[in-house]
Every structure is written in structure tokens, then in C-alpha cells.
Amino acid sequence: MTANAHDTKLLLFRAGLATAGILALLPAVVWLATMLDTQPLPNLRIAGKPVPIEQPLSTFLEQTAEQWGEERLLLQTGYHVWRPTRQQLGAELSVQEALDEIQNVGHSFNPLLVLRDWWIAHLGNGHDLSWRGHIVNGAALDSYVQTVRAAVDRAPAPGSFDPDDRPIPGLPGEALDVESTKFAIQSAIARGHKDLRVETLVTSPPRSFRRFAPAQPSTGTLPAQFGTGVLMMRQETEYRAGTKGRANNIELAAQRLQGAVLMPGATLSFNQVVGKRDPGRGFAPALELINGEVAMGVGGGVCQVAGTLHAAAFFAGLKIEEFRPHSRLNQFAYLRPGLDTVVAWPEHVTDLRETKDLRIRNPYPFPILIKTSILPAESGSRVVRVELYGSAKPYRVDWSFEELERVPAGEIRRADASLRRGQQQVQQDSLQGLVILRRRTIYTPTARIQEDVRVAYPPTPRIVLVGSS
């Protein structure tokens, strides 16, 4: 071996030793550098969000924790669906816990672990840190579960017969296990799950069937065997007492409706109960909607009583067999879109079937008593209240409406001899039409029933009077 070859091998050996020494010292160097640097490593993610470098860390974590608490979960108890926020369940993310988790990355006393964290942060995919929620408010969790329990729990009820003597099945019972539900929620929060399901205990209805004697006109009380002691639903709407004709008609219609009874499986006709609106029966002239235009007519205001009854029946789970929305959308109405209804009995009509009616049917195996009352409200207004009473609580009902379409309004120009030629006067402002999808979900112990109804409010044209004199 020549001297040059020997020197080359020696140099390579020394270089290898130097490299090995540097590699051996690298973890220590990285460890020392990271221990002296108090800033978090780059490329960190917590709760799925990148940890910012410019923004103060505590501010970012507080905002993330607040958004996490406001996010809604999906809770199913039997066929019931609930969407509580994590805050409503008493859950919270600890900001201090997240700060500690972030600071621990790359700040271990083990140089090899520090080197690994540094490598992943700078040359790898970064770190995904866990941030587990905890139930910190047990009272909030218990309160929410008790609310669910109050809506779910129901005793079974025996069946009955409809007016044609056909059997109406009894109602199954249902119960919620409170402790199991709370445990399932706590586990879901800790594991980061966004939906969970808890089964309920469903019991079969009694095999017996009850018969009820036909209801007689009532002033608000029924025989004890009817068992109408449970308030199923209450609905209220407000009106101004100063509009005498309208107030008179509202109060008279409410008085006629007071004490009406819906037998099991029977249908109630609002027009049949309240009767034709004419002066001889006490109804007075008042402003009302006729084909989208405000005009004077006998009985104006009766629609508000019908709408209040319709809303009460809707939320009590009764069958809505006939209803019509108003011919004009009123953004300041006493009921939200999809809940109002128009009723009319034209003067020339004698057959009830040719009227615009509200008809509701009782699907429950027990009678339902309708109670109405007029109550004072603030600022001199009054409230018409409609209450439904039965022998058992109604099915739970959820509802929503989705806007499908806005329909532009046109313009109508009418000649008016009371105005000079060339003069114009706006008689009525335009209002867009609205088409909505009304959705009602009825939760029973054995099924979840969804009803979708398309409701259309036609546009109201702008009416301009043009002088022709």
C-alpha cells in the first residue's frame, strides 16, 4: 500500500469519526436550542385548526374553545332528535390544558424525543394535538337531560273508537333512562364524537278500548270520564283593542269556539262552529284581506282566531285536513309564515263545503276540549288564547320552514274619476310573494313522522290610481 493511499484512508476515517460525533451531538444541540426557545414549534394543529404564529396563543385558544362550545351535536333518544350545543350540556375545553399540550411538544428532557418532534415539525407533516372536552357543569347536563326526559316520557293510553265505530289504537308508553343518557353524553364529549344514540324503553298500550258518549255543547267543562285534565298545547296571538270592529269579531269568534270538543277520530270545522259572519249574528264590519287587497268586510279579524287554533292544533300533533294561507304575506303578522290561515264564508254561499274553512282532526284515542279566553296585554293590547286539553300529553312536534322562492310583484293602474287627469295616487304598495316549504316532524314512541307542505303567498301588486276626470 502506498503512502498516499494510506493517508486517504486515514482522512476518511477521521472524517467519519467527525461526522459521527456531529450526529451524536445533534440531539443535544437541538435539545439545547428548543429548551432555550419558549415559542411553540411550527406546523402544529390542535382541534383540527393550525396553531397561528402571529396571533397570541391564548386568544386563539379561547376563541377555538368558544366555537367548540357553541357547536351543535346530534343526540337521538329513541326516535327523538335533539341538537344541543356543547355548552348546553355543560361541556368545556380547558385553555390551560391546551397551552400545556402545545408547550410540551419539543420541550422534553429526552434529547431524542426533542429531535423527533423537531424533525416532524420542520421536515414532516406536523403535529396533530388532542384537546379533549370535559363536563365541567354537571347541573347544566342534568337540566338538559331532564328537559329531554320531560318531553320523552309518557304513560301508555288505551284505545278508543272514531265516530264511525272504527277502532283507534292506544298510545304506547315511553321512558328515558336519565343516568344512561348522561353517561353516554359524557363519553361522547370525552371521545370527541358529534353524534350519539340512546335507546328508550317503549311499552305497549293497554289492550282495553274506551267508549265516550257523544259530546254535548259545553262551556269549558266535560264529564270526568272524558279525562280532559292535561294541557296539550297553548297558543296566543295579540291584537289591538282599539280597532273596535276587528276586536269585536275576534272576541265573538273566540266565544263561539269556547268549549268545542273534538271526539277521538272526529274532525272539527271552524266555520261550522263559529258560523256565518253576518251582522245579524253580531259580527261587525272591519278591514280584511280580499284577494290580496285590504278592504272593508263583515267579520274581519276572525282569521286571527282560526290561525291561533290552527297553530295550537299544529303543535299538538293534530291532523290539519284543510287550511289556506292568506292571499298576502304580512311580515308583521301575529303568526309566522306557514301557521296563519284564512277562513271565509261569502255572503252568497249557503253550503259549508263551498266556504274557505279550517278543518282539524283528532288522531288521539281520547276527546280534546278547546278552551278560549281573552286576556289583557301590554300597551292596551289584548291576547286571544286557545288551549287544547286531553287525557294525555301530545306527541312532541318540531317544525321549520324553508324559503323556496321570492315572487316579484307587479303593478296595477286603475282609472279614478275623483282625480284630475294626470294625477296619480298610490293606493297600495307592492309586496313580494313568498313560497316556503313547511316541515313538521312528529315524534312518537315507535316512529318519526315528517310532513312537508308547500305554502305559497302570492305577490301583492302595487295599485296606482290614475286621474281620469
Image (cartoon, rainbow, N blue to C red):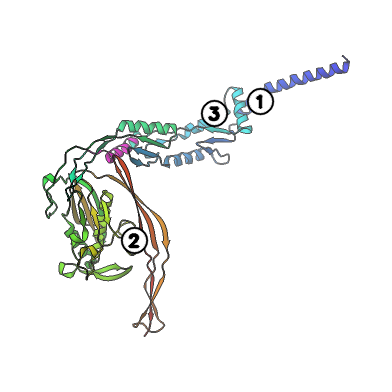
Residue 270 seen = yes
**Could you say where residue 295 lies in the image, as x and y percent from the top left?**
29, 71
Question: Separation of disc 1 and disc 3 at Cα?
Answer: 18 Å
Characterize the local packing of mark 2: few (<14), some (14-19) or many (20 or more) Cα atoms within 10 angstroms. few
Q: On the image, which quarter does residue 303 sit in?
A: bottom left
Question: Separation of disc 1 and disc 2 at Cα?
Answer: 72 Å
Viewer-closest of 462 and 208: 208
Question: Where does the C terminus fall, quadrant-wise?
Answer: bottom left
The correct choice, above or below, for 375 with respect to 61 in the image is: below
Amino acid at dot 3: Asn
Residue found at the far top of this picture: 1
Characterize the local packing of mark 3: few (<14), some (14-19) or many (20 or more) Cα atoms within 10 angstroms. few
**Could you say where residue 297 lies in the image, as x and y percent from the top left?**
25, 70
Amino acid at dot 2: Phe
253 lies left or right of 451: left
Amino acid at dot 1: Val
Residue at label 1?
29
Q: Secondary structure at mark 2?
A: loop
Mark 1 or 3, nearer chain start: 1
Residue at label 3?
104
Viewer-closest of 256 and 383: 256
The correct choice, above or below, for 277 with respect to 52 in the image is: below
Which of pointers 3 and 2 indicates the residue nearer the eye? 2
Q: On the image, which quarter does residue 103 sit in?
A: top right
Is there a contact, CB below 8 Å, between mark 3 and mark 2?
Answer: no
Residue at label 2?
332
**Could you say where residue 261 lies in the image, as x and y percent from the top left?**
17, 52
Is there a contact, CB below 8 Å, between mark 1 and mark 3?
Answer: no
Question: Where does the N terminus fall, quadrant-wise?
Answer: top right
Start-end of magenta stretch? 141-155
- Is 146 inside the magenta-drawn segment? yes
Our reading of the magenta stretch's main secondary structure is helix
